[in-house]
Image (cartoon, grey):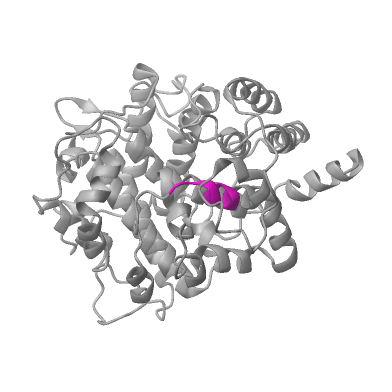
Amino acid sequence: MSPAAVVNELEALFPPPSCPPSALAPQRLPGTSVESLAALQHVLQDNHKRWHIFLNDMKFHNHITHRALALYALGGSGSIIREFYTQDSQRQLPAVESPEAITLTNFVDHLGDGRYYKGYVDFFTREIDEKGTPAVLEEYIFSDRFQYQEGASNQPEMLSRFTASLLHALIHVGHGLEFGLKGMVVEGLALAAVQDVDGKDFYPSRFFAENGQVTTEADTPVFDVIARMVRDDDLKVKNVNALREFKQAVEDHAARIRGYVAQWTINVTKKGEIERKVEELIWLTSILYAIGGFDEVKGFTGEFFLMHMVTSSLFLPSLITSLTPGSQALLLRAYLVTVLTWWVARGPPVLNVKSFMASTSTRPSAPIFEGDDGSGFPNEHPNPFLPIIQSSILNPNDHLPKIQRSFAHFSTIYGNRPAGYHKGTELEGAELLDGSLFIRAALLTANYMREANTWSINGFF
């Protein structure tokens, strides 16, 4: 391919970002400039050419594009985007050519093999060019054909790969749909293809057969489901082996967790149902991380794995825009299985809503601006999210701007929910929750990272 053709291909994969796909998807903060756009496109295109999706043989993920897009969306300058790319590039694996091209014939044969990442990138690029993104997602992530195939020695289980390993493929594709970047969708689908499943039959064949079946008119919200799990003393990870807790939770409790998830109702025939269920999941991931991480005596712990539940939920509004109703329901139910398995794997942490709402603050510990005598607003905090966002942009930890962007967006769309909004659910103290959850979580996170400088991986055992 000639240099000019390579440039044209990269520009087609990573054009200037488009507007968000829906009102529920995150909106951009002011600060976008010619400079920041040029820096973003350089990072996205250069990363695509030079680096592998995994940064080591343990299949830890390349987060370069996630940080760059978060910084761009938050209004970060071009120089900041470029500097963090320089830093993040220090620990990447170089891109390698696939041992052979991926075609429909050998698609399943090389799933889970990172050496074929470039082959899957090329394959999904052709497929999207021919069929469009929605059709490719439906076929390769949600169709029965690419879950289980009779006689296959290497089962596709593509939905399981899509949500595996802390949901990174879902997050990658979610970025592509939010920003209108075909290259991010392609990379995310290729990542799913070379990702290992979290456990054999994590979503068994009956999981797909039962999807979308509505057997009752009654609505069971997700807070009812988590409340029932809280009361289940058998949902513990025993004989903890450091950093193997998730696989242990899958082995010990996957079927039990899927049973609880089956109680969660999704009736796609109801107008606005999918959007309501997305909101339920956003509240759930936020309380698992924020309330689960809070102890009245010990203070707050920013837990690495539960943090990913929050940052992944940011992309649910964008993902559902490209799916049919049946696949929307399947995505949300599969997502809930993964989230709840991670919650169990991390302890599970206690959810003391009353203590959290009574003991945490909605105001920074010091005023951001001390008004002069004539201001009329002495010691006021004009908007506590603005300094949180500013500090996260400059923070060297690449996950901090992502989670603070998430909480800022959740506050934008759900911050005006009053106390009592969740009244009537089975979760103890849920009636006390209001939209301040998101600023409380953001402040706790900012303060924790200021002191700890890194996320906790110790869980709550």
What residue lies at 37% left-to-right and 76% top-to-bottom?
A: 209
Residue 343: % across, % down? 26, 45
- Identify the image quadrant of the N terminus: top right
Tell me: residue 83, above or below residue 57. Answer: above
Residue 256: % across, % down? 20, 59
Q: Identify the image quadrant of residue 258.
A: bottom left
- Which residues make up the magenta segment? 188-196
Residue toward you, 208 or 272: 208
Q: Is residue 155 left or right of residue 44?
A: left
- Label tally: 0
Question: Magenta span: helix, strand or loop, mainly?
Answer: helix
- Identify the image quadrant of the C terminus: top left
Is there any visible trace of residue 417 in the rendered image? no
What residue lies at 26% left-to-right and 73% top-to-bottom?
A: 219
Tell me: residue 32, above or below residue 172. Answer: above
Residue toward you, 353 or 40: 40
Q: Is residue 248 left or right of residue 174?
A: left
Whether residue 366 appears in magenta in the rendering, the answer is no
Is there any visible trace of residue 67 in the rendered image? yes
Residue toward you, 78 or 94: 94
Whether residue 193 appears in magenta in the rendering, the answer is yes
Residue 220: % across, % down? 24, 69
What residue lies at 37% left-to-right and 73% top-to-bottom?
A: 211
What residue lies at 47% left-to-right and 26% top-to-bottom?
A: 375
Q: Identify the image quadrant of residue 292.
A: top left
Residue 247: % across, % down? 29, 43
